Image (cartoon, rainbow, N blue to C red):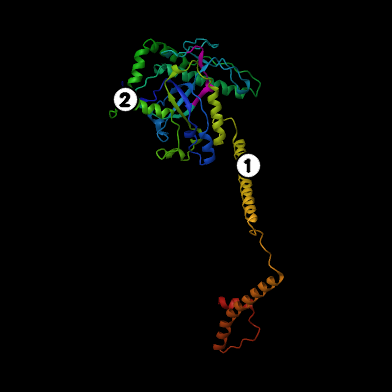
Amino acid sequence: MVLRNHPIGGSYVVVSLDPVASLAWLDDPISFEESCNMQCGKYIAYLTEPWSEDDYVDRVAGYVPCSLVLVAQGRPPTNPSALYNQAAAMPILPNTSSELGRRPVHAYPSLPWDDCCHTSPLSIRSAYCKPRISNEEPESMLVGANEEALLEAYLGMDDIYLWNRLHDREKGREVVFPPDEPRVVRAIEGADKDYKDAERWRRFMLDSKVYEGEERDEDAASEADEEDYHAPSSRTPEAPVLAFPSRNAAQRVMVRYSYDLSSFESPPDPVGFLRELDEMKRYSHLSLLATTSFDELRSRIATDCRDRWNQQVVEVEQKNAQFIAALEAQGVRITPRKPSCLRRCFQRVRRLARAAVFWRKRVSPVKEKGRRGGEHIPSGALSPRASSSFSDW
């Protein structure tokens, strides 16, 4: 078997959200502990890599950026509140049904399920996955650059459609789907030509990922990669960069992936993945789906901090009350005793005596200096307030 660098762009994978790695940048032990208890499912998605080496600049502790387009079985129903129309779907072979007459996405080999499609709301553009080296091969891929370009073009058109509906709904105008752009027509022509030689394109994409490093045991590599996929992530000393603040830290979605598509009788509902993202949003206090404004976000953060602070105050007061009650049960006097009237008078006389001694020490050097100079200083001329000017002089 040949070892390859993974992930392989253009392949269909089994993905699962990794909340521990996604929220490792949070400096909040409570949120981190809760995120470790999140139960995340597995979903089918199409995975793409960056188009150029410049896109790899935003590496995070060994993770590489990628994009995910989740696979749904059956078209999601129309949702007017979310401005989504079920006609905006891209069928995946062997599914060919499309209300807009769109060309299906040709996966090779075909997916093992029927009636599958891609939609724009089920795409995650800012995800990260961890590279690994193994002898695995994807069970299904989009072969050729034109097939990938066609999918990206359809997703871009649907994004523009949703944006126009958002603005035109306020004006009471109905938005229709735009016709296929020239780039879509060119991508369809190129994709049809590439699919005729799909096996050659598939081998070319796999050979471009052949591992050229030092030799290593293939069985050990495969077992290590399998353990790496199933083992939960944690804050390890080898990955400290995840905790560094960054302008993109709140939008990082860390995922795990594998190629075992045949283990599913049907694709899981991808809405569960979005719900898990929304659950992770509760820990990070930031909307990964951009559904709230900044003022609402700031108000929610302030409310959460205030509630947590009040809860901590109540807990401390309860602990103090329990501790004091335990001491009183042992006969220890906790309430401080007020000083008596005679004691307060004695303390006041002592303060006055100390003040008199202090001012006497400050006036005496000035009187001594006046006698040496032959000057007569009348008695009572040096008050405590006047003596301060002489001492300063």
* Between 190 and 113, the one nearer to me in the picture: 113
Front label number (2 vs 1)? 2
The amino acid type, in three-letter code, at marker 2 is Glu
Q: Quadrant of the C terminus?
A: bottom right
- Assess whether residue 122 is covered by the magenta stretch: yes
- Is residue 135 shown left or right of residue 71? left
Label 2: element kind: helix
Give the magenta part as a residue range.
113-124
Please identify the residue farthest to the left as the structure is shown.
215
Residue topped by disc 2: 218
What kind of element bears circle 1? helix
User: Cα distance, mark 2 to mark 1?
Assistant: 53 Å
Labels 2 and 1: the sequence-earlier one:
2
**Residue situated in front as seen by the camera: 191 or 250:** 250
Q: Which mark is residue 307?
A: 1
Residue at 31% x, 21% y is 2
Outermost right residue: 341
Residue 159 makes an appearance in the image? no
The amino acid beneath tag 1 is Asp
